[in-house]
């Protein structure tokens, strides 16, 4: 420990930590643009500069280590002026179309300009004309809005170990781009959208489907069905200024109905269905000598990652479609028939925490006879927009419950929204499938928590299962490499692309604080704690569906509708 | 030799290489193949365990790397200080306009390629260019158009012979 002086006040600090860490702890707000907690600091933007006594130049606090007796001044006239000048210079070459930007009102550059009192255009820089990359089904990249902070580059490389984008060119010609300046669609981008969460401006945003959905809702010939993913109900409220971790499931369902959706279904129901299929698949692989370890297949970014980098491990992937696609397939088959609807007239919309779900819905495997399982995917952010646009006061609307036959869920299905949740839900059901008994304690603490990698050994009847849970694909890569090198004590692996799982998915409300993600995660576990129906195999609606339509889990019909296949991707520029 | 074989041969010279060997490898590949093709970059990436975006990023940082094969007539326009003062930017722009290509690019028919170079040590002749090593001195903008025409004409006559 050591002592430093911040603006005349003495503060305790640990040797080796950065100035910014101390400042944040001490309640001093120094603005940052390139800094993201958990990623390597680069000191690139220099927004966080402070004055250190005895040094002539300003130092970037995000990348400057503390030393004993340091005296710093965070908001001296020199430091504030330097920050303001940086913002002015960034704005000098930035498009002036804030009112037309996806990040209008939620842009860090805009906020900084306001906070620092930029009221005059002191610099007029050269504006580069660059093409907007719209070829990717999940994300839109507008390099003109890029301020070169490098957050997206680092998140793509450090968290996801993909590196689809990097700094291209030099000096004033620098841009962030893909290799050979190709579209994101042919790059190694896995569509996770983590870049859109960290982008301070509108340079990386989700591909918007709000208008498509509005058109479908306005078309009297269309029967529009919506499903909402497990994690959305615990994050949506943030878009309306409510504190993170608030569940508004019932209000959201009511809002979806008021928007005009003919039926509102809960993806947690099809998560239960996924568990029935996936747990049966696991038990079957364990008892019939199938490929192990089996890896979950709910997260489309992860799927593309395996297809690109580990094609030899495709047989390890569960063949189960994700809950979104299972629900879509059931809506266009069983549900349409039951309601006497032509599947062509049914528009299936899903509300997802995820940008990769847009890509998943567009995969060839997910389109049967020109009829896609899911027509449009909206992110949590897009849903919030739709709700605001239609004057629905989500905080004061009476709650409603989702529709039958796919509205009933267990809290196991709800747990899908966070890292470890699929594992916990699957273990609860696999245990029952193997032993015909229920776990005495349904809570499996070993797979909970915010760590990027969790491992446990679980006794299921006579079997001792080795399980691993990873989130963030850099963590997944390490585990896969261990397995390739011969590690064989793991039978089942849950992988979620985004760190912490869907609660921090690329389509979620933009909020960089790790505490927010923890609050979202906690909300899911709270729901599980309070619930009486806590296992997928006890969900009566799931039972009805098997009885009336599907037959048995892993049976012929469910294989045709609920399972899929994968392709080795050799054509991407990885 | 195929690109793949050429790159393979170069990579054998870099046993157990790490990412710090990237630039020398890129230089060798460009020497051998004339440019850095997508295929070559993918191959190097797989060998060094680097994403291609990173390699492309490094390669675009330096002027020396190109991503298209050089044309039959490789035009190097000097943009050193003396040439700049004497108006080489106008000459360069004229080449871009007439050939419809930019720095580092090659015309579709493969006849011309354009490259900006720093001082080529002939400041007394500024502004100066070199076409396949042959110097053209004290140019004005119109000379660029004339030079392109002359090479095109020569190529046509060569065809007719």
Image (cartoon, coloured by chain):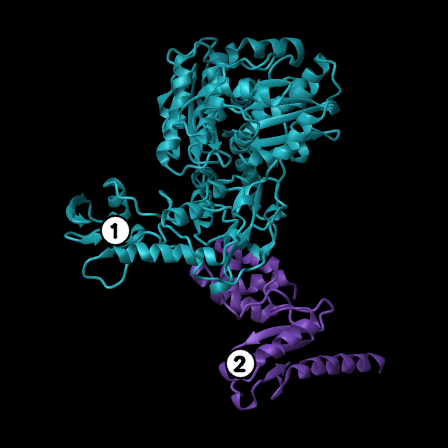
The quadrant the N terminus of chain A occupies is: top left
What whole-number distance in Å separates the C-alpha atoms at marks 1 and 2? 44 Å
Rendered location of residue A282, percent (x, y): 52, 22
Rendered location of residue A475, percent (x, y): 42, 39
Question: Secondary structure under badge 1?
Answer: loop
Q: Is residue A433 above or below residue A108?
A: above
Sort mark 2 into few (<14), some (14-19) or many (20+) by Cα contacts within 10 Å.
some
Residue A407: image quadrant is: top right
Q: Is residue A506 above or below residue A120?
A: above
Which chain is cyan in the rendering? Answer: A
Q: Read off the residue under disc 2.
A: B84
Position of B116 with respect to A329 (left or right) is left
Badge 1 sits on which subunit? A
In front of the other: B82 or B107: B82
Asked whether the residues under the numbered discs 1 and 2 touch, taking CB atoms below 8 Å apart as contact, a structural biologist would say no
Residue A366: image quadrant is: top right
Question: Secondary structure under badge 2?
Answer: helix
Residue A423 at least partly seen: yes
Rendered location of residue A234, percent (x, y): 45, 24
Residue at x 63% of width, y 77% of height: B75
Which chain is purple in the rendering? Answer: B
Residue A275 at least partly seen: no
In front of the other: A334 or A198: A198
Residue at x 64% of width, y 30% of height: A213
The numbered mark at residue A74 is 1
Residue at x 25% of width, y 40% of height: A27
């Amino acid at each position: 420990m050591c002592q430093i002086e911040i603006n005349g006040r003495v503060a305790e600090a640990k040797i080796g930590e950065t100035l910014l860490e101390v400042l944040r702890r001490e309640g001093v707000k120094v603005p940052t643009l390139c800094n993201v907690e958990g990623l390597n600091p680069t000191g690139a933007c220099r927004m966080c500069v402070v004055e250190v006594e005895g040094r002539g130049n300003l130092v970037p606090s995000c990348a400057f280590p503390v030393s004993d007796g340091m005296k710093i001044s965070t908001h001296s006239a020199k430091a504030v002026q330097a920050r303001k000048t940086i913002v002015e210079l960034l704005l000098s070459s930035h498009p002036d179309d804030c009112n037309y930007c996806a990040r209008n009102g939620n842009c860090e550059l805009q906020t900084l300009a306001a906070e620092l009192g930029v009221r005059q255009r002191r610099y007029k820089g050269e504006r580069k004309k660059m093409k907007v990359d719209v070829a990717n089904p999940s994300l839109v990249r507008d390099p003109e809005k890029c301020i070169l902070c490098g957050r997206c580059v680092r998140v793509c490389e450090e968290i996801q170990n993909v590196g689809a984008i990097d700094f291209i060119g030099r000096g004033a010609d620098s841009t962030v781009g893909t290799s050979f300046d190709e579209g994101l669609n042919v790059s190694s981008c896995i569509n996770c959208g983590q870049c859109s969460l960290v982008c301070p401006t509108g340079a990386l945003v989700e591909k918007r489907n709000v208008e498509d959905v509005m058109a479908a809702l306005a078309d009297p010939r269309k029967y529009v069905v919506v499903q909402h993913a497990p994690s959305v109900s615990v994050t949506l409220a943030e878009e309306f200024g409510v504190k993170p971790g608030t569940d508004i499931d019932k209000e959201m369902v009511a809002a979806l109905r008021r928007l005009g959706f003919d039926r509102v279904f809960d993806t947690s129901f099809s998560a239960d269905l996924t568990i029935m299929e996936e747990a049966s698949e696991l038990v079957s692989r364990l008892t019939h000598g199938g490929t192990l370890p089996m890896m979950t297949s709910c997260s489309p970014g992860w799927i593309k990652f395996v297809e690109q980098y580990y094609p030899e491990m495709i047989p390890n992937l569960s063949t189960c479609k994700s809950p979104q696609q299972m629900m879509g397939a059931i809506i266009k088959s069983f549900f349409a028939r039951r309601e006497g609807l032509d599947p062509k007239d049914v528009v299936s919309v899903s509300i997802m925490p995820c940008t990769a779900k847009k890509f998943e819905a567009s995969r060839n495997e997910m389109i049967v006879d020109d009829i896609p399982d899911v027509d449009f995917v909206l992110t949590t952010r897009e849903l919030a927009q739709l709700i605001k646009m239609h004057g629905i006061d989500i905080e004061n609307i009476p709650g409603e419950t989702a529709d039958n036959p796919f509205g009933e869920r267990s809290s196991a299905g709800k747990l899908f929204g966070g890292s470890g949740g699929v594992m916990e839900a699957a273990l609860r059901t696999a245990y029952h499938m193997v032993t015909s008994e229920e776990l005495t304690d349904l809570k499996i603490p070993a797979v909970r928590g915010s760590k990027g990698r969790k491992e446990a050994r679980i006794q299921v009847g006579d079997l001792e299962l080795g399980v691993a849970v990873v989130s963030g694909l850099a963590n997944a890569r390490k585990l896969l490499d261990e397995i390739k090198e011969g590690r064989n004590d793991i039978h089942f692996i849950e992988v979620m692309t985004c760190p912490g799982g869907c609660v921090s998915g690329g389509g979620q409300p933009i909020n960089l604080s790790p505490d927010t993600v923890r609050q979202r995660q906690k909300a899911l576990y709270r729901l599980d704690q309070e619930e009486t129906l806590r296992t997928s195999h006890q969900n009566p609606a799931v039972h009805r569906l098997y009885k009336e339509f599907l037959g048995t889990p892993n049976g012929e019909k469910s294989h045709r509708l609920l399972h899929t296949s994968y392709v080795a991707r050799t054509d991407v520029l990885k | 030799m195929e690109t793949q074989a050429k790159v393979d041969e170069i990579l054998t010279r870099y046993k157990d290489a790490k990412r710090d060997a990237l630039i020398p490898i890129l230089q060798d590949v460009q020497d051998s193949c004339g440019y850095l093709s997508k295929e070559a970059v993918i191959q190097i990436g797989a060998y060094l365990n680097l994403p291609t975006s990173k390699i492309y990023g490094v390669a675009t940082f330096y002027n020396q790397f190109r991503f298209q094969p050089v044309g039959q007539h490789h035009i190097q326009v000097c943009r050193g200080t003396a040439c700049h003062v004497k108006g080489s930017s106008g000459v360069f722009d004229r080449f871009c306009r007439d050939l419809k290509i930019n720095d580092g690019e090659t015309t579709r028919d493969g006849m011309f390629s354009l490259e900006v170079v720093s001082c080529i040590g002939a400041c007394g002749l500024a502004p100066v260019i070199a076409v396949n090593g042959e110097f053209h001195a004290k140019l004005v903008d119109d000379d660029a158009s004339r030079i392109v025409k002359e090479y095109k004409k020569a190529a046509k006559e060569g065809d007719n012979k």
